[in-house]
Image: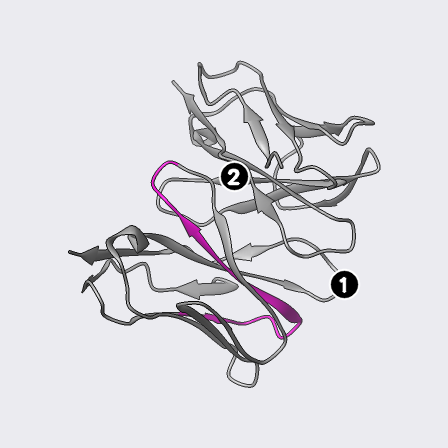
Amino acid sequence: DAGVTQSPTHLIKTRGQQVTLRCSPKSGHDTVSWYQQALGQGPQFIFQYYEEEERQRGNFPDRFSGHQFPNYSSELNVNALLLGDSALYLCASSFKSGNEQFFGPGTRLTVL
Amino acid sequence: QKEVEQDPGPLSVPEGAIVSLNCTYSNSAFQYFMWYRQYSRKGPELLMYTYSSGNKEDGRFTAQVDKSSKYISLFIRDSQPSDSATYLCAMSPLTRYKLSFGAGTTVTVRA
């Protein structure tokens, strides 16, 4: 049973650029959540997608946007990158009614 | 004040010792409590999942929740060097699905 997968593993961008991160949920899961984890900190909730709609959003600016596809996979887009956006971006999947969230390995984004 | 407080450690124990980890929280709406283990440069792995107050045991791991004190704990018995990782507590309210995390406690088990 494949777990949550994310791509790419690592990414280096410069300030002002745009980036797209991808996530495929665990088999049978239909809800995808995105988190940002700065070094030495716990993950911070960005937003959650279910049925191709953003269901809940954390305290992140509009530069952070997302999308969910009919096959439940998801993308996270970040525009106008800032140095402070450097972090590990984690995708987690779950069932609609489940609070158990299973995380992928993450994408490490470095903004220079 | 952060919604979830967790002592970042680091915590160093000899192999075979009991590891005790804890978190406190301020939001009384939290109903679901989780502990994740995160190895260096990896994604968090779900260890324990509990609902409301009480204890839950799974192998060498025991999770305790005391909602009256807004305090949760994780105990690891017979600790092994492979238990060396960062342990994150997480929680969410009954009707919402956003997880609120602590900052994580780094644990090293010495062989």
* Residue A78 seen in the current view: yes
Specify few, some or many for label 2: CA neighbours under 10 Å numbering under 14, 14-19, or 20 or more. many
Where does the image place residue A89, in percent across and percent down from the top left? Answer: 51, 34
**Callout 1: residue from which chain?**
B
Residue at 56% from the left image edge and 57% from the top image edge: B100
Q: Main secondary structure of the magenta part?
A: strand
Residue at 60% from the left image edge and 55% from the top image edge: B99
Specify few, some or many for label 1: CA neighbours under 10 Å numbering under 14, 14-19, or 20 or more. few
Kind of residue indicated by mark 1: Thr
Where does the image place residue B77, in percent across and percent down from the top left? Answer: 33, 70
**Residue designated by label 2:** A36
For mark 2, give the secondary structure. Answer: strand
In the rendering, which numbered label is found on residue B95? 1
**Callout 2: residue from which chain?**
A
Q: The C terminus of chain A appears in which quarter of the rendering?
A: top left
**Viewer-nearest residue: B77 or B101:** B77
Q: Which residues are magenta?
A: B22-41
Q: Is residue B60 magenta?
A: no
Q: The N terminus of chain A appears in which quarter of the rendering?
A: top right
Q: Is residue A2 left or right of B77 when viewed as pictured? A: right
**Viewer-nearest residue: A101 or A19:** A101
**Viewer-nearest residue: A64 or A37:** A37
Residue at 42% from the left image edge and 21% from the top image edge: A111
Total number of numbered labels? 2
Kind of residue indicated by mark 2: Gln
Displayed quadrant of residue B105: bottom left
